[in-house]
Each structure stands twice: as structure tokens, then as C-alpha cells.
């Protein structure tokens, strides 16, 4: 398959499923073309897709060229006019000739498309297209104002304070009283909003790139999605109560958040990270955030192999568990605001309007709606890999949730633990409510008295958060687990209400996210300290066997 056929495949998938280009390209290892080349071409073509679809449709080439699918025509037109190297095929290649012989007609349509948009030169149009891709168009396809995804910035109180930053880094910014002012801001406005749920978190919009701020470079500001701040805040580690483990820690956003919550308390955080490369990033992040005195990084540490009965674990009263997941709740920085719009297959050549036909096996269909992939920088997990079919997705979710449950049960086996948070940036119930219900019904939970942290027992900002877990998903998991209709004496509605969800995109300005808290009343040492519980040994054994381990989507340090 050529570069263009593979690129067409990618764009069609992105357009059909709304998936991210990055995950489609890099989630598959069997491309014939170099993945970077494919990503470069498809992301450029996606940026230009609205203009080029118009050009291809109006030129009528699709009505006369049998070998060209709409997507191939768009890609080839892109390279013909907009790539420095031109079409990456020999001049005699069928695809090249099928587009090149319409160069004059296509060029005229490109000029008309530019003039309709009131740009005097192609360079001016290019600048506009690049800016729209970076910042998002001002309106949706139906001319409604587009919801902007804020940049969420956590003020690192280990190094600075909210007041200091507002008076320095954000001195040119105006305070917005509601998040809506941020999500509906115009592109040139500089505004901040102090979040009403998470202390020391602000939402920002403006033309400046926060990674260029000095405060960011000095570790005073941490770019962290709002939802990603929920787990440490929900865990609510009590100063002087005991120590905390961050079980799956890299790149370290939640680790440094925990450290800031525990500053001056005497309690310590142990951060485990299994992956060697990500361990280095974690170490760097902890240092930059000024959290080195509070956090001990255990590089290359598989959490499942940490012995809960070991002396170093006896003081651990809280655990934060944020394992690898499908990443289905997130969107990638690289494709923020990209719209994939493909030409309609039904367009006919002006000269032969009666000769309507299908091309390249592609079904004739109405012009597809643009798909927005709005997003912001996320560094903790890469976006979801595209699954070709439901069976593959199911298998992947089964694999992930088995691993996630194992980690959660291992966390429950720490003898002095009183609180655990479990979180994913997944939208799938399989990784969320299902795991929670299975964990609550497991032997380790029932024997050690683990319960769900009820909404009424949650820290203020989290009990006020409006979007809760799915009662239906909890009910389904209860029925599947043959537990009847209650867990911990709570019905599905109450367990669902104890779980917290965030929606991907929309007025909340969040990514798709899930978090649940677990508590153990009393929380006293409830087992023999010189022997790990059976579940832990089983987990270790499974890990040794290389089974049920998921390593798929955690490499993103971009
Ligand atoms: C979703 S990311 C964590 C993001 C992190 N909590 C943050 O907020 O920056 C999951 C991490 O867990 C690591 N991981 C996966 N399995 C692990 C295990 N068994 N033990 C320790 N780390 C693990 C992955 O390598 C990955 O870095």
C-alpha cells in the first residue's frame, strides 16, 4: 500500500470514528510507510481538509477519475499545491497522473477558495489555516461559538503561591468569574478563572503559550488537566497521619500534587514507576517541582512487586492508583482543534453531470460532517488506540481491566492503608465502574473492610462536583458479579453517586476521566505484618508470568 493509500485510510478512520490521528498512526505498527511521514501528511491534510474538500468537489475531478477516491484526491491535491516536494510519486504513476492532469482546474478552484475567504495570497491563507489549527476556529460548522478547552494550570505551592503568580505571570490577564467566560473567550482575550473545585488551580485562555512562561520553566506552574487533579485532592492525605504511595506515578503530575498537599506535614510520598524511561521523567518532574524532600522515586519499580508487608510499607496509610488505561478520555495536543472534512463522493464533473458513479469501491454517501478533535496538552497518557472492531476493543478492555483490578486489590492489601483513590482517563465502564464493583466484592476488600468512599464523605470540592458515575454501569456490574443489587449495603445509585466522572470536552472544560475513593474504617493494621495477603502473591505471580500486564499507552512525554 502506498503512502497515499495508507494516509487515506487514516483520514477516513479519523473522520468516521473521531479518533485522534496520533493514536491511529502510532497505534499501529504494520504500516509500510514510515509512521512519522504518515503523521506529517495526514495532520497537514487534515488542517487543509475544509479548503481542499471544496477544491476537489468543485473541480469535478471525482466525476472523471475512476482511480481517485475522495480522500486520495484530497491528499494528492494537498501535495500537488501545498507540499514543497510535490506529489511523492513518479510522474508516470497512475495516481500522480490522475491528479496532475487536472492541475489547471484544481489550481483555479484553489484560487477561488482563497478569494472566497478573502485572502490575497496563498501564504496569507496558509497562515490562517495554521492559526485555526493551533487555536481552533471561532465558530462551529453551524456557526455556533466554539467551546474552547482551557489550559489548566496548577499553581505549585511548593514553589510559589496563587497570589504571587496572579501578580506576576498573569498580570496582563483579567479575572473571569465563571468558567463559561473562558470556554467562550475570543482568541485574543487573556483571561484566567480560579477553579471552584480544586484549590490552587486556574483555567487560562490567551494567545500566550504557557510552556514559555518563566514560572513554568521554574516548576512554579504545572500544566495539569482539571480532572487529573481530582485523585490527589480526593485522596485528601492527612498531615501526620502516615505516608502515601503513588503506585503508577510517571510523569508525576499527581505525585507533585500529593507532595504539595503534604508540605510541612512530615508525611512522605513514595512514587513507583515501572517503565525505565518514564522513571527518569518522573525523577526530573519531582526535582523541578521542588518536591524532592517529600517524594522518594522508586525507579523501575513494579507496584505489584512492592511487598505490602515490608517495613517500608507499614507507615503507608493512603495510596493513589492511576494505572495505564485505554486513554479514551483524552485528546492529544498535536491535533488540537483539527477538523477532518473529506470531499463528498457524490460530486460530479461539471462537464458530465449525468455520469454518476462510485469510485474506488467507496460507497456513495452524503457529505460527512466535520469532526472536531478539540484538545489540550495532556502528558499523562496517550490517546486511545483505534480499534478496528468491537471484538478487538472488548479484548483490549478485558486485558486492561484485569490488570487494573489486580493493582487495586494489591493496593487494598497494604496493612495500614485507610484510603485509596483509583482513577483512569478512560470513558469505558469496563475500566471504571466495573473495576470498582469487582474490587469491592473481592476477598481482600471484604476481609479487610474496604468500602467505597461515599459522596457525603468526600472532600468539599469533590462532593460538590456534579458529574457522577453511572448507576446503570454499576448495576450491570453488580448483576454480572452475582452480588444481587447492593455492595457495602449501598444500591447501584449510591455507588454510582460515590464515583466521579468528567466528560470529554464541553462546558466543564474537562477530559474524559473517572475516579473513585475507597476507605477502610478504623484503618488499623488489620493483618499480619510479616506476610503479604494471598491476592498480592497472586498478582506478583501473574506479573512474573508476564500475564495480564498492560504496557500499551503510557509513553507520551510530549
Ligand atoms: C496513566 S500513567 C500515570 C500518570 C501519572 N499518575 C500522572 O499523573 O502524571 C500510568 C503509569 O503507570 C505506569 N505503570 C503501569 N503499570 C505499572 C506497575 N505495575 N507498576 C508501576 N507503574 C506502572 C506506566 O508506565 C505509566 O507511567
Image: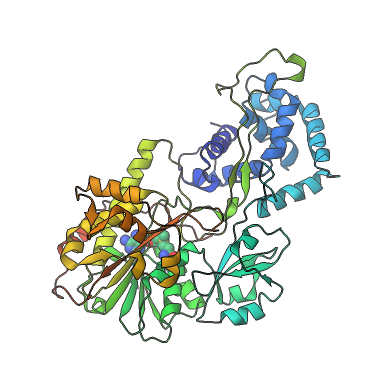
Q: How many marks?
A: 0
As displayed, is residue 215 above or below residue 401?
A: below
Residue closer to the observer: 459 or 350: 459
Q: Quadrant of residue 100?
A: top right
Task: List x then y, in percent, for residue 353.
Answer: 72, 15
Residue closer to the observer: 435 or 291: 435
Task: List x then y, in percent, for residue 439.
Answer: 25, 58
Q: Residue at x 29, y 48 (%)?
A: 475
Name the side, left or right, on which 2 lies relative to 133: left
**Scheme of image coloration:** rainbow
Name the side, left or right, on which 149 lies relative to 452: right
Residue closer to the observer: 524 or 130: 524
Q: Residue at x 63, y 16 (%)?
A: 357
Task: List x then y, in percent, for residue 276.
Answer: 39, 64
Ligand 1 shows up in the quarter that is bottom left
Quadrant of the rendering where the C terminus is positioned: bottom right
Q: Quadrant of residue 176?
A: bottom right
Residue found farthest to the top: 354
Q: Residue at x 50, y 52 (%)?
A: 504
Q: Quadrant of residue 232?
A: bottom left
Residue closer to the observer: 244 or 5: 244
Q: Residue at x 68, y 65 (%)?
A: 208
Task: List x then y, in percent, for residue 40.
Answer: 61, 46
Q: Residue 367: in sight, yes or no? A: yes
Q: Residue 252: in sight, yes or no? A: no
As displayed, is residue 102 above or below residue 445?
A: above
As displayed, is residue 347 above or below residue 420?
A: above
Amino acid at each position: 500500500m502506498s503512502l497515499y493509500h495508507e494516509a487515506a485510510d487514516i483520514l477516513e478512520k479519523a473522520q468516521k470514528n473521531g479518533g485522534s490521528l496520533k493514536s491511529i498512526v502510532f497505534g499501529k505498527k504494520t504500516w509500510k510507510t514510515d509512521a512519522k511521514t504518515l503523521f506529517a501528511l495526514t495532520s497537514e491534510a487534515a488542517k487543509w481538509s475544509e479548503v481542499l474538500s471544496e477544491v476537489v468537489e468543485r473541480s469535478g475531478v471525482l466525476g472523471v477519475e475512476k482511480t481517485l477516491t475522495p480522500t486520495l484526491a484530497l491528499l494528492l491535491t494537498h501535495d500537488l499545491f501545498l507540499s514543497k516536494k510535490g506529489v511523492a510519486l513518479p510522474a508516470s504513476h497512475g495516481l500522480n497522473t490522475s491528479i496532475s492532469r487536472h492541475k489547471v482546474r484544481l489550481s483555479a478552484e484553489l484560487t477561488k477558495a482563497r478569494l472566497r475567504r478573502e485572502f490575497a495570497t496563498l501564504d496569507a491563507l496558509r497562515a490562517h489555516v495554521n492559526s485555526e489549527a493551533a487555536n481552533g476556529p471561532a465558530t462551529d460548522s453551524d456557526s455556533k461559538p466554539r467551546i474552547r478547552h482551557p489550559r489548566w494550570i496548577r499553581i505549585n505551592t511548593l514553589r510559589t503561591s496563587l497570589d504571587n503568580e496572579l501578580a506576576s505571570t498573569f498580570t496582563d490577564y483579567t479575572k473571569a468569574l465563571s468558567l463559561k467566560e473562558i470556554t467562550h473567550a475570543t482568541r485574543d482575550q487573556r483571561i484566567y478563572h480560579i477553579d471552584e473545585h480544586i484549590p490552587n488551580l486556574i483555567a487560562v485562555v490567551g494567545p500566550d503559550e504557557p510552556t514559555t512562561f518563566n514560572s513554568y520553566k521554574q516548576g512554579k506552574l504545572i500544566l495539569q488537566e482539571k480532572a487529573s487533579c481530582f485523585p490527589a485532592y480526593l485522596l485528601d492525605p492527612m498531615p501526620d497521619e502516615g505516608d502515601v504511595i503513588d503506585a503508577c506515578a510517571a510523569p508525576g503530575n499527581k505525585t507533585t500534587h500529593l507532595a504539595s498537599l503534604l508540605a510541612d506535614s512530615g508525611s512522605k510520598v513514595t512514587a513507583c514507576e515501572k517503565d525505565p524511561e518514564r522513571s527518569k521523567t518522573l525523577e526530573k518532574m519531582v526535582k523541578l517541582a521542588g518536591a524532592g524532600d517529600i517524594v522518594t522515586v522508586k525507579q523501575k519499580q513494579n507496584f505489584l512487586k512492592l511487598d505490602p508487608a515490608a517495613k517500608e510499607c507499614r507507615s503507608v496509610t493512603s495510596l493513589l492508583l492511576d494505572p495505564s488505561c485505554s486513554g479514551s478520555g483524552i485528546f492529544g495536543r498535536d491535533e488540537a482543534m483539527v477538523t477532518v472534512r473529506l470531499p463528498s463522493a457524490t460530486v460530479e464533473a461539471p462537464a458530465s453531470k449525468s455520469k454518476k458513479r462510485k469510485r474506488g469501491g467507496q460507497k456513495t454517501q452524503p457529505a460527512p460532517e466535520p469532526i472536531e478533535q478539540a484538545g489540550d496538552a495532556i502528558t499523562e497518557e496517550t490517546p486511545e488506540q483505534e480499534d478496528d472492531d468491537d471484538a478487538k476493543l472488548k479484548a483490549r478492555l478485558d486485558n486492561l481491566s484485569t490488570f487494573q483490578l489486580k493493582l487495586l486489590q494489591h493496593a487494598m492489601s497494604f496493612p495500614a492503608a485507610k484510603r485509596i483513590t483509583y482513577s483512569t482517563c478512560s470513558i469505558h465502564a469496563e475500566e471504571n465502574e466495573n473495576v470498582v464493583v469487582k474490587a469491592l466484592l473481592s476477598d481482600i476488600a471484604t476481609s479487610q473492610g474496604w468500602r467505597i468512599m461515599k459522596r457525603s464523605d468526600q472532600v468539599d470540592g469533590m462532593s460538590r462536583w456534579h458529574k457522577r458515575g453511572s448507576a446503570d454501569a454499576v448495576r450491570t456490574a453488580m448483576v454480572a458479579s452475582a452480588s444481587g443489587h447492593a455492595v457495602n449495603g449501598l444500591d447501584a445509585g449510591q455507588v454510582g453517586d460515590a464515583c466521579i466522572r468528567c466528560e470529554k470536552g464541553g462546558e466543564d472544560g474537562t477530559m474524559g476521566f473517572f475516579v473513585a475513593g475507597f476507605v477502610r474504617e478504623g484503618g488499623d493494621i488489620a493483618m499480619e505484618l510479616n506476610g503479604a495477603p494471598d491476592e498480592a502473591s497472586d498478582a506478583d505471580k501473574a506479573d512474573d508470568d508476564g500475564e495480564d500486564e498492560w504496557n500499551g499507552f503510557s509513553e507520551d512525554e510530549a
